[in-house]
Image (cartoon, rainbow, N blue to C red):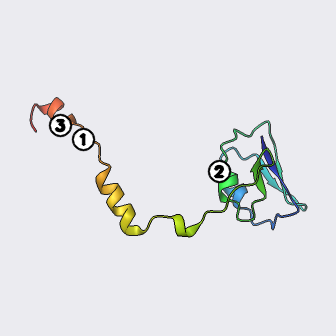
Amino acid sequence: MITYDNTKCDKCGLCLTTCHEHCIELTEEGISINHESCSTCTHCIAVCPQQVVSWNHIPSQKIKKELLPTSEQLKEFLKSRRSEFHFVERLTGKF
């Protein structure tokens, strides 16, 4: 279940705008989640900069920027991960 700690909430509204189920409300105290509507997609957890939102009160981890790939590494990865399908050959009989 998605849980939250409004003592950390700065009311930025990122969770509210990210929620595709529209189950998060911004109140004077912070956020409020309608768990009946929540699909537990966890997008709200991913975008919360204050780590207000969590899964069963388990705090999320901050991303360590030094562990992220560089733009060059991403380019190489995307170039190397191509699936080869021969749809044209099947449709036209040509390569």
Three-letter amino acid code at the position of disc 3: Val
Circle 1 residue:
84
Residue at 84% in and 64% down: 8
Residue at 10% in and 31% down: 93
* Left or right side of 41 for 65: left
Task: Report which quarter residue 31 is drawn in.
Answer: bottom right
Three-letter amino acid code at the position of disc 1: Glu
Task: Label 3, secondary structure: give it.
Answer: helix
Circle 2 residue:
43
* Left or right side of 30 for 42: left
Q: Nearer the viewer, residue 24 or 71?
A: 71
Task: Label 2, secondary structure: give it.
Answer: helix
Residue 50 position in % (x across, y down):
75, 65
Tally the numbered discs.
Answer: 3
Q: Are marks 3 and 1 in contact (CB under 8 Å)?
A: no
Circle 3 residue:
88
Q: Quadrant of the N terminus?
A: top right
